[in-house]
Amino acid sequence: MPDLGQYAVYVLASYAVSLGLLAVIILASIFQARRIRARLEEVESRKDRAA
Amino acid sequence: MASIWEYANPRKFMATSAFVLPWIAGLAGVCLVVGLVWGFFFTPDDFRQGSTVKIIYIHVPSAIMAVNAWLMMLVASLIWVIRRHHVSALAAKAAAPVGMVFTLIALATGAIWGQPMWGTWWEWDPRLTSFLILFLFYLGYMALWEAIENPDSAADLTSVLCLVGSVFAVISRYALLFWNQGLHQGATLSLDREQNISNVFWYPLVISLAGFGFLFLALVLYRTQTEIRARRLKALIAQERMG
């Protein structure tokens, strides 16, 4: 860990907030994609069964 | 040679994006790790800013990508308005939350850096204010997509909003040139070598910028795939209801 001196709180807070926000958008995108894909597969299989 | 308009076909887009997405996501991960680890652990403090200079490796790339994301949405919206390609409208919709997060990161890290360096979290400076307005435009754009039931009408209206918001995207980038006032310093990255930062900061910054760029591209492709699937899902459900 580098010596961040008197500004350590500011530097660490910047990285924590940024990496946290990036994690939120990445995870939200993954969860949304999984949810939509699962629902689409369900509806498509229902459609195939009905045909 | 394949025409770019082939990718307006959702099937073609899905196949191509599925192939390139792992590579782009991998490049994003590598560049982000190398750029941020290099910048955080292996660069010296600045003689004026001290260790707060390390915030540059996230603040500058996120701010650049916040503006470029909106400009990408503008191009995609114009393609929708002119050529009515659904994939381009969905790509613009997919990019908005990513651009919003980049704008939020730029605002938050700017505020955190500003407190020790300027003595204030916020200043109604031209660049900061135009960035805040850009952030509000992102929120408005996303809200408008959600508020309108008909996807084509939503795409039309959000395209108009995107066009209007582009004024603020441009102002965000060139605010310092338009109004030579305010606290915010000039461009960190410049094609003019005389104006550029020292190489010791420049190399990790450029790698981090590449990481943010690849991450944006990967997320937009991934989220556009999801939007295409969501659109098909909606169509199938509507078909079922009609019997």
Image: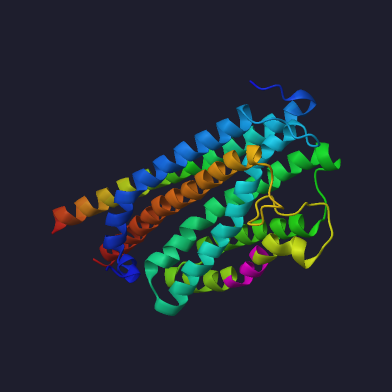
Quarter of the view holding residue B235: bottom left
Q: Nearer the viewer, residue B108 or B2?
A: B2
Q: Residue furthest right?
A: B119
Question: In the rendered image, which quarter contains the C terminus of chain A?
Answer: bottom left
Residue B49 horizontal side relative to residue B93, left or right: right
Chief SS of the magenta region: helix
Magenta segment: does it hold B166?
Answer: yes
Regarding residue B125, the answer to whether it shows in the image is: yes
Q: Is residue B205 above or below residue B224?
A: above
Regarding residue A31, the answer to whether it shows in the image is: no
Position in image of residue B207 (x %, y %) = 53, 42
Q: Is residue B122 above or below residue B69?
A: above
Looking at the image, which residue is at 64% across and 63% down? B169
Q: Nearer the viewer, residue B151 or A25?
A: A25
Residue A38 horizontal side relative to residue B171, left or right: left
Question: In the rendered image, which quarter contains the N terminus of chain A?
Answer: top right
Position in image of residue A30 (x %, y %) = 41, 42
Position in image of residue B136 (x %, y %) = 66, 58
Looking at the image, which residue is at 33% across and 56% down? B229
Range of magenta residues: B163-169
Q: Nearer the viewer, residue B238 or B223?
A: B223
Magenta segment: does it hold B60?
Answer: no
Q: Is residue B211 above or below residue B159?
A: above
Position in image of residue B73 (x %, y %) = 51, 64
Looking at the image, which residue is at 75% across and 35% down? B46
Q: Nearer the viewer, residue B208 or B141?
A: B208
Residue B211 horizontal side relative to residue B199, left or right: left
